[in-house]
Image: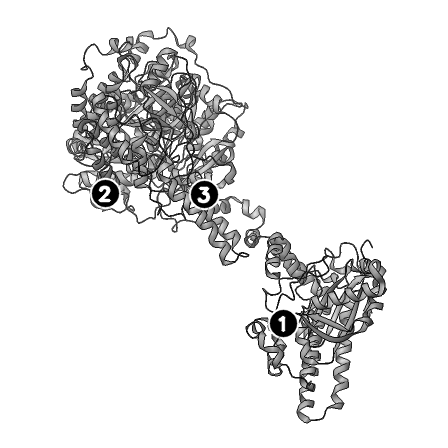
Amino acid sequence: MVRLKSRYLLCGVCVSDRRNLSLLDDRAIYTATKAAVARAHGDYGAALSSLGFSVKYLNAHTGIVFLRCRKSHYRLIWSALPFITSLENRGQRVPCFLNCLHVGGTIRTCQKFLVRYNTQQLHRMLPLCQSEAERSEIRKSVLSCTLKKEADDEEEDE
Amino acid sequence: MSLVDFLQSYQKMSTAKHRMRDKKMRNQPTNVTYSSQGSSHWRNGGDTHTGRGRDLSPHPWGQGSSHSGHAQGGGWVRGHQREGHGGYPQALPTHITASAFAKARAAEVNAMLMAVTKTTGSSHVFGALPKHMRRRAMSHNTKRLPCRLRDMANNMLEKSQKAGQKVKKEQSKSKSRKARRRHGNMLLEFNRRQRKNLWLETHIWHAKRFHMVKRWGYCLGDRPTYKCYRACYRAMSSHCLLQDMSYYCCVELQGPGEQLLAALSKLTSKETGPTFAAAMCVSGRRQGSVVVYRAGQYPLQPLGPVTFLWRPTTQGRRGQEDQGSQGSTHRQLWIWAHPTMKTDLLPELQAVCQCSEAVLPPAPVDLPVPQPAPTPTLAPGPGACPEAVPASSSGSKRKWSSREPEAAGPPAKKLLGYSTISATTPVTWRSSTTGIVISDLTMEMVRYRLIGPLSHSVLTETLAPATHCDATGKSRPSPFWWPDHCRDDCNMSLHQQQAGVFNMLKGVYSTAEVPAGSVLGLTVDDPRLTLPNKRSKAVSDIRKAQGVNEERRRELMLKGIPEPLSQSSLWDRSVRDNVTHNKMTDQEVNRLRNDVLVPGSRLPTPLQGRVPVLLVQQSGKSQGTEMGSWGAGWDLLLPKAWGMAFWVPLVYRGVRIGGLRMSLKHAQNKGEPHFPHDYPDCPAGARFQEEQEAELLAKFRRRPPAKRTNYIKHGCLAPFRCPWQQLVEEWELIVKEGGGGGEEAVASMEQEVTPPQSNFTVLRNRKSLRQLSAWCRPTSSKCQRARNPGSTPQLNRNVAASLLSAHGGSSLVWIRLSLVTKGQPEQHALVCVPTAEDLQLVRKEPGCTGPQEPLHTDHFKSRVKRPRKKDHNKPGTTSSSSTKPENKQSDPASTSVPGVNPGPDPSSSSSLTNPSSSAKQSDPASTSVPSVNPGPDPSSSSSLTNPSSSCTSALTLGLWPEPLPSVTSHCSRVTLGWVTQGDFSLSAGCGEALGLLSLTGLLHTLLRQPEGQRGLVLLRNPGSLQYRFAKINIEV
């Protein structure tokens, strides 16, 4: 109806050195993305894309980022994402790249996708485990999130 | 940086909005980072503000799963991050473990699941439904929802309905309306509702038409719901106003006459006027009124005013009375007192009469009541009833219960009389030594007050003297009192005389012509029998009555009602009980009316339709020069249960009905003190003042603060009460200062802080009052010369001092104030002493409005506001910002307190001592009023008595906090006293007020006023700055 439609980009931040994840925060990603757009599309593109652009969610542990932008110009950001090679935070430069996993029309679809994606990853990890301890750990975490889901559903029913 | 940003934006966002947003974002995941620095609060993109306040609430999923993750360095809990965030970069391992990886994913999955499954925003179920499945009015009709969601929606609906309704509504619907309105159930309900506050017999009539108030243990009509203020005044001054005064308590004293008088003399003093032993009253011809004190304490500890009535001992009765062992000296006395006074009066009477022996109520018949005749059996069977009213007796017999225990009778019983006391509470006390019996006749009788010059016409039209019994009725033994009464010729001749006098009242022009306090006993027919079809106005019909027996009428007016005629059977408990028990119900009267052949003709009088009544004349305005005998009227005393039977016929004669408010106005227009209001020295008056203060304060607090009057700015210390004690003490000090000299000023100020605990009294010594009254009038006025031809000494210092020493300094004088020009005084208005300039002003131009009080400054305002501001700041501010306003505000409060008074120098506390002492020293030399210039000394006293340590919690904007500064010298004019009630008087045509002044202050003022302008004071309302000139009238 009468609203500004958005696109939500679900990206994974891939860092070569895991220690640098501690430096990850939404401001760094915001500035890096804006800089990339400016470089790729010039001032006009940067201005267009900066409208309504925000980092909605960031998980430093898993390196997952939700970016939100206007639907009309999301391609500008989308296309500029591969040009990000590093993030800068607190004077430190972290070499990384952003991997766009999903583009959604609502944040809800992105969340749904993320649920599916993460569970898929966990399931994929399970047969590749090397030690028994690891296997049990992963199984536990897999169970924890699936069980939680059922519990949530039950709660909902109540 | 970012924290400050956040705080600013946080404060900008209103709390409600914030709450909404919190609720909406409750289930949404937040950022998870290793570093804590403002990551979540950072305003990215500039369009939305992503700080969701999550840091205030615990992390929903980070807590559940990530506590365990700490082992791998994945401690996500924000608090934990903060304390050790410097060390994390080193702690993070370079490699990645499978378990940490898996845990992080699992946690994220959980968070996302939460966000996806829980619907945001509105709590309705259909929020989860896709748009194309939503339907109109889904929340109202759950059947429009898909089946799987219906249960949930039903739950939700129920919850929301419960939230809207009050919980207690449920139980009232247990019975159907029809069942609830059934007579028996209704009576039960009425009895339940009377448990706390008693109802008068006219309660239901009043409740339909009046605003009812619960006061003194009764439900009383305060004022009618319709507009009738002026109509009621007109009724009082030209026709008749009716009031139900049944809530007044009657205490009956019986015993040997001498013993009674001796006991009662301890309670009163001759100095206040006629006592219980006044000759007119003792004979029973007149009703008297007297102010009662605690035994032997005369000038101190008054209890309040009472009216009393002796039972006459007439020749007609003595014939039978000789059977009683007490003989002719046995007397009976009724004392009528206000219900608030009863709790004080009754123990005092018991102590005085040494009546400690309680007689248990089940045996009230044992009372040594002089029986008029051998008592007939009081409990007739249904067979003994006369044939005229076959259905009546058994039905009515069951219904009326006098004082029987409630539980014993059938459950649905109409309660009459003083039903709230339990059956075992004694109401009668007997003394073995003096032979006096005190019984509490509260609610045993109905008392109606008719006020107005035509009350007698209303009475003569409503009441008809009882018709005689025919021969058959006399001969047969009957359960009713009248046939027995008729058998005696003495009684009959007495009745005829009484009826004659009563008929003579028709020829009286005004009620006031009958001597004040006259008592007329009478036996009348049931007034319902002659109820007119239509309500009409009773008019006096002098023409008809004139010329019939002019001499006798004149004799009645001059000499009053002769003594024997004041006798009535109402005095006998047995007769009263008989009449009460045998009252016909309205239903039976209506049936009689139905059976009458010619509609509208008079009903035949049934045997039980005779009621003994007492008529007591109430005097009108007896003091003052104008509107003499205004507000005179009759009191009608009836046996209980007959209230409504007389009330409706009276109303049908065109009277107006007044409530409590009108009785207050009646007293005010009459210029006489009204009981709880104008008796602040009585315990009941003190209680009333407290109640009134609480009531007014609550009313004041109910207003929005911006709409309240700031009484501090108006220079009014106590707008809701009158601190009499403080006033009296301060005036004593002022006078002492004036006599002593300046050296004592400082010492006296110190004394003021710790006032001596003495009680004030109201001056009621008639001789002194007469003196004062003469002094208060300007000497040039004619009426003073005419009234007091040199009987009172001229006012000078010595006479005043002797008067003062005779009554002690702590006396108040009750006065009436009438305004000279315009103005309408209000309750608790200040009465002030005019300065010499004011008097000059009024001499120059007599029509001047009067001086103005300079506006005071409210230094408590800043202190009042502080706590609220603190609350406001609490959520957001850091420690540095919260301490600041406190410092700022405490500064002016502490420094400006000495300047509270608008006096000439609000300069500083250091300059206090010098000007005050110098002014004091100069005062006696110049022989001006030492306290009239209130500039320096109030400031010193206020700074002393008003320390900044006074508790700020009790502060209300616009009211002075509790330790009041000096009340006399707070304003630019010295306060003499306060007004207890004031209004525009319709009878005088100007504003009139009743109030009390300090006797010391009054004499002090009078001595310093020029002779031509004595008794001139200033009056100022609590919410106004304008002073008005008023004249003092003291009326004896």
Residue B355 in picture, x, y percent from top left: 19, 42
Tell me if B302 is positioned left or right of A122 in this view.
Answer: left
Query: Dot 2 corresponds to which residue?
Result: B429
The residue beneath circle 3 is B862
Say what amino acid the circle numbered 1 marks: Ser
Q: Chain of mark 1?
A: B
- Mark 1 to mark 2: distance in Å? 88 Å
Residue type for callout 2: Trp
Local SS, label 1: loop
| Amino acid of disc 3 | Ser
Indicate the position of residue A64 as horizontal and vertical percent values: 73, 73
Drawn side of residue B2 relative to residue B352, left or right? right
The kind of secondary structure element at disc 2 is strand
- Work out how far the residue at label 2 is from the one at label 3, CA to CA, in angstroms: 60 Å
In this view, the residue in front, A44 or A104, is A44
Is any part of residue B410 visible from this angle? Answer: yes
State the residue in front, B918 or A147: B918
Q: Residue at x 25, y 11 (%)?
A: B787
Q: Earlier in the sequence, mark 2 or mark 3?
A: 2
Taking the spot 77% from the left edge, 64% from the top edge, the residue there is A34
What percent of the width, then of the height, locates residue B1031?
34, 18
Residue B1014 lies, with reference to residue B741, above or below; the image says above
Dot 3: element: helix
Viewer-nearest residue: A60 or B863: A60
Contact between marks 1 and 2 (CB within 8 A): the answer is no
Residue B398 visible in the displayed image = no
Residue B399 picture quarter: top left
> What residue is shown with label 1?
B35
